Image (spheres, rainbow, N blue to C red):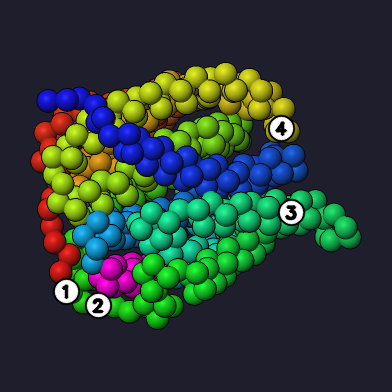
Amino acid sequence: MTLLVKEKMFYIHFFKLTLIIALQNVITIGVNLSDNIILGGYSETALSAAALANQIQFIALFLIIGCSQSVVILASRLWGSKQLHLIRKVIGVGMAASIVIGLITSITVILFSTELLSLLTADKSVIQEGAHYLKISSFSYVFFAITTILLASLRSMEIVKIGLLVSLFTLIINVSLNYLFVYGHFGLPRMGVFGSAIATLIARILECIIVIVYIVKNNHRLGLKMRHFFELDTTILKQYTKIALPILLSSLSWAGAMAVQSGILGHMGTSAIAANSVATTIFQFVTVIIYASASSTAIIMGKTIGEGSIEKVKAYSRTLQILYLFIGILTAIVLFVTKDHVLFLYQISDEAKALSLSFMTILSITAIGTAYEMPALSGIIQSGGDTKFVMYNDFIFMWLLILPASLLAAFVFNLSPVTLFILLKSDQILKCFVAFVKVNRYKWIKTMQVQR
């Protein structure tokens, strides 16, 4: 049995998809980074408020992204088997689910923003500022839902450049509007966190319009019309739900866990909140290639399974695992080297800076584990059709192991923020062992048929 695939086109295709998606992710993270930098220069309270508000809205965004992942899993298989008419039906179901989630979460956040933030911190000024941010930015969820499903549908057919261009446009608009609204340049009022939320909302609306125009004007490969995105086929809905429900529950579990983690750190002071925001934002920026590798894996594996090439799927999975480790080592080195050169961008306390450096050092180690387990689980296993395993795995590690241990460390043993951060991120290493065993047994390959 040959360990590595010898097809040159496999590597070209994988790295081409990965690099394009990574650039898109860099720009997307750049939107968050620009918010952090601009608000970090405004005040530490503003930075902490936006950081906690983002933890709340990550739940909505994770669920919407879960809907899009389900579209990619099904649609990429149909792309491989050339059943183009069914791709349109899958997209329609995914769009309906995503919009419903966007509406429900928007209403919930608008009505209970203060109560939700109170679960994460006791700092009244942070809660007040965060509530202002959430009540405006929550209107962007539906626009984000539409954009995400449209781009996922194109990505499943290996059309990825439009996502990069849209993200670049969003970054430019968001940074420009943040500059104007947060500090009140060119005669505009100085709005702080409130202005950052308005900038985000405007950017989301504009990017949605751009993608819709592109779909209507340029996509001739599938013959998509806007009405296809709002058609609800009940048979396809059942097949989509079978794939999507575990992904959505896993996304909800993960997003909720991230909010709880921020809440645990939030009760350790504003410096811990700010340091966590800085460290995780830089981490996301440096490790975009990891998440891109998972997305490109899902496209390649889904298409290959749709073509019926099961032996090729196994060979691809073996090769990909080695590529993941190389990617992990590279990103770990980059994060460790750059961590000392980014803090000048932030106007935060010396305590927050010291914590940020410690947090980024920890993340540079766990990045290697993330680079392997995340694409192995959400790229290989999920795209193979075994979405329940990923759901159970995430739930057990996070809610039965990591969070209970971290709560004890924070509120019973009163351990330091650095020790607590190590506990919170330890699952990124532990999951590697489970992922290795699961992937190399090949029981995750499900040759389901999308039928209508």
Write the start and end of the magenta stretch as one range.
84-98
How crowded is the residue under tag 4: few (<14 C-alpha within 10 Å), some, or many (20+)?
A: few
The question of residue 87 being in magenta is answered with yes
Q: Residue at x 82, y 55 (%)?
A: 184
- Residue at horizontal 68 percent and vertical 52 percent from the top: 172
Q: Are marks 2 and 4 in contact (CB under 8 Å)?
A: no
Residue named by callout 2: 233
- Front residue (pair 303, 417): 303
Query: Which is nearer the eye, 426 or 434?
Result: 434
At label 2, the amino acid type is Asp
Q: Are marks 4 and 3 in contact (CB under 8 Å)?
A: no
Q: Amino acid at mark 4?
A: Leu
Please state the horizontal and vertical placement of residue 108, each as a whole percent of the image: 46, 65
Element class at badge 2: loop
The disc, 4 or 3, on the residue closer to the chain's N-terminal end is 3
Quadrant of the drawing holding the C terminus: bottom left
**Mark nearer the N terminus (2 vs 1):** 2
Residues at marks 2 and 4, CA–CA distance in whole angstroms: 50 Å
- Measured Cα–Cα span from mark 4 to mark 3: 17 Å
Crowd rating for badge 3 (residues with CA inside 10 Å; few <14, some 14–19, many 20+): few
Q: Which mark is residue 345?
A: 4
Q: Is residue 278 visible?
A: yes
